[in-house]
Image (cartoon, rainbow, N blue to C red):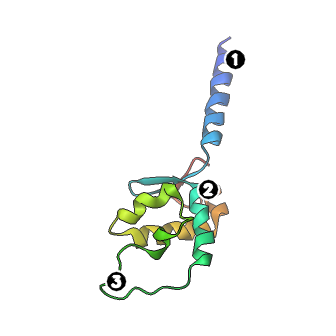
Amino acid sequence: MDTFLLSALCLLATWAVLAGGVTVQDGKFSFPLESVKKLKDLQELQEPHTRKSGGPAVPQVCSHQKFPEELKPICKETNARDILHRLEAIAEDPSSCEICAFAACAGC
């Protein structure tokens, strides 16, 4: 009976981890990997944009209509460009996150 209960708990815990999927964390932010993957598509749609001094602090991609809702809190941060740059690196090769090659990835 105890072995059955322990096995059931282990299977339940494994299912919970798999159902939650892989999450990407950057500082105080945590996002589903699927949302981060969408950045790659947006990056390809955007034209190269160089920021001039005194220009907008909010990255151009934040105003795109297909920008993932889960990632919008980043756009309010003063270091939004840095955070998005790090997330875009993961979006470029999401398979490395799925195997937890990045320290920012969890739930693999």
Checking the image for residue 4, the label placed there is 1
- Estimate the x, y position of residue 29 in percent, counting from the top left: 42, 55
Checking the image for residue 34, the label placed there is 2
Farthest-out residue, front: 65
Identify the element where label 1 is drawn.
helix
Rounded to the nearest whole Å, what is the CA distance between mark 1 and mark 3? 62 Å
Checking the image for residue 55, the label placed there is 3
Earlier residue among tags 1 and 2:
1
State whether residue 10 appears in this view: yes
Number of numbered markers: 3
Q: Is 90 left, or right, of 59 in this rendering?
A: right
- Please, is residue 25 above or below residue 48 in the view? above
Farthest-out residue, top: 1
Q: Is 105 left, or right, of 59 in this rendering?
A: right
Which tag is nearer the camera, tag 2 or tag 3? Answer: 3
Rounded to the nearest whole Å, what is the CA distance between mark 1 and mark 2? 35 Å
Which tag is nearer the camera, tag 1 or tag 3? Answer: 3
Measuring 57% from the left and 67% from the top, which residue is drawn there?
Answer: 39
Identify the element where label 2 is drawn.
helix
At label 1, the amino acid type is Phe
Earlier residue among tags 2 and 3:
2
Earlier residue among tags 1 and 3:
1
Return the residue nearer the eye: 13 or 42. Answer: 42
Checking the image for residue 75, the label placed there is none
For label 1, the crowd category at 10 Å Cα-Cα, with few meaning under 14, some 14 to 19 and many 20 or more, is few
Which tag is nearer the camera, tag 1 or tag 2? Answer: 2
